[in-house]
Image (cartoon, rainbow, N blue to C red):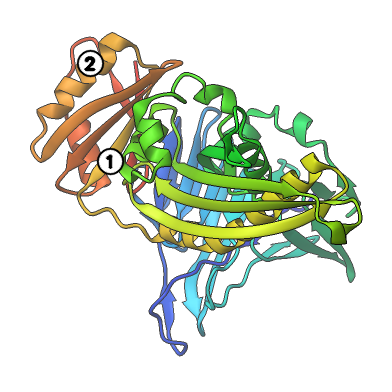
Amino acid sequence: MKRPFYIILTAALIFSGVSLAEETEKKAVIGYLKGSVKVIKKGENIPVPARLGMSVSAGDRLETGLDGKTELKFEDGENFRIGDNSSVVIEELKQQNGTDKSTMKVVFGRIWMNIKKSLDSSPKESRLITRKVTAAVKGTTYRADVDKDGEAVVNVYDGTVSVDKDGKEELVSKLEKVSSKDLQKAKFDEAEDAKDEWVKWNKNRDKLRVMIVFTERKNKELAAIPISEVVFAEEMLKNYLYTVIDQAELKNIRESEKLKAAVKGDAAAAAAAGLEIGADLVITGQVDTDVTKPEFLAGWYSGVADMTVKAVRCDTAVMLAAKNIQTKAPEITEQAAMTNAIRKASIKLLEQMNDRIIKSWKNEAAKGSSMDLVLIGASFENTEAVRQALSSISGVKNVNQVSLVAKRALITLNFAGDSLALVNKIQELKIKDLALNIVGLSLNKIEIEVK
């Protein structure tokens, strides 16, 4: 008989304001819920249905059914997700001697962990321990699949996992996987892997959806096709956090007045334009390029790029970052000189902006201001019915439908309270011929299935 195999994931959590000498217990909150998910609280034997916003702590066990999945959210924005037909025990959630620690014991099933790289000096510890292997993890994104016999496969999507078995160490890097059976590292095909619905769902939840809109002038002439948009997007996509909206999706709104105002620096217009196509973040830019052929470069061209970019968060219209830089790049052709100057500017600006964007995203608090409601399975008729019902809730103001695309509607509103309080009020609504199933919750967004 095979011994049960457990996979223990220790994920670092960055919490502030705790003395180095203290040991403090931490909690996580259920931030997404779909299908059958049950919680067995520490010291109890009877499972209870999981609820959005429910706190879970060390000693609790989570079990999902064949149609179930859930997401645990930690205070610093880290996410631990549990797939269908899984059983997970929270072994540890605490800060000890100044280091944030959490330990998850996965009996069987599928998990996904998103551990953001540390953006400050807070110590963090992250390990993955099994009866057969030990993995040391620093800021990374990975998943583990554990079968009923206890064998596991770990796929790494970002960062590095150091896996040790019987004194043998393997460094598993981005787009590599390792099996607990033989500890043999191998590459995996990202495109093929992405066909898995579990992988697709997790990647969509991990990333910020970014809209990039630039105006570009070459030698003072307005460029019909901004090369800088493409180059900046290429550099941004190198960071796992971002997914960039295809430029084809901008076609219908590129000439809109709000987008033109956004490029000129209007943060509210940028946010409104981004919400129209479901963006979380809008990057606007103005780029001036010039190419010369100075004698000292012996026939080579010199490209110059003067780039100003601004990042605006769509749900709050807050400008997260604004930067300007000028770069030069010599190349053998005129086009290459201009493109490389733009690329150098893009790389340097992203280096300066990334930390600010990520920190602002993580630290933005809900202040009773704007919230987004995403309706899944929406039509014009049921979206309007939901909008009117929301307007009847005490404390709700300015309920507006922003978009309706591919059966997904976006409604924005103001509410004098937090998102969990609003969820409770939405669950009390009675709408003729409609059922609202709330599946997702964060500080500023609520996801609702409409049936």
The picture places residue 148, in percent across and down from the top left corner, at 71, 41
Q: Is 390 on the left-hand or right-hand side of 177?
A: left
Residue furthest front as drawn: 295
Label 1 crowd (10 A; few <14 / some 14-19 / many >=20): many
Q: Is residue 401 above or below residue 159?
A: above
Residue 377 percent location from the top left of the image = 40, 17
Label pair 2/1, CB-CB below 8 angstroms? no
Relative to 431, 236 lies left or right: right
**Position above or below: 436 against 366:** above
Q: What separation in Å lies between label 2 and label 1 (alpha carbons)?
A: 17 Å
Judged from the image, the secondary structure of the residue bearing numbered disc 2 is helix
Q: Using the rendered view, name the quadrant where residue 333 is placed.
A: top right
Crowding around mark 2 (Cα neighbors within 10 Å: few <14, some 14 to 19, many 20+) is some
Return the residue at label 2. Answer: 384
Q: Quadrant of residue 271?
A: top left
Q: Earlier in the sequence, mark 2 or mark 1?
A: 1
Say which of 78 and 415 sits in front: 415
Q: Residue at x 58, y 28 (%)?
A: 247
Nearest the eye: 382 or 145: 382
Residue under numbered circle 1: 371
Question: For residue 433, which numbered disc appears in the image?
Answer: none
Q: Residue 222: give x, y in percent of width and height.
A: 56, 33
- Quadrant showing the C terminus: top left
Which residue type does callout 2 highlight? Answer: Glu
Q: Does residue 429 show up? A: no
- Amino acid on which disc 1 is placed: Met
Residue toward you, 132 or 414: 414
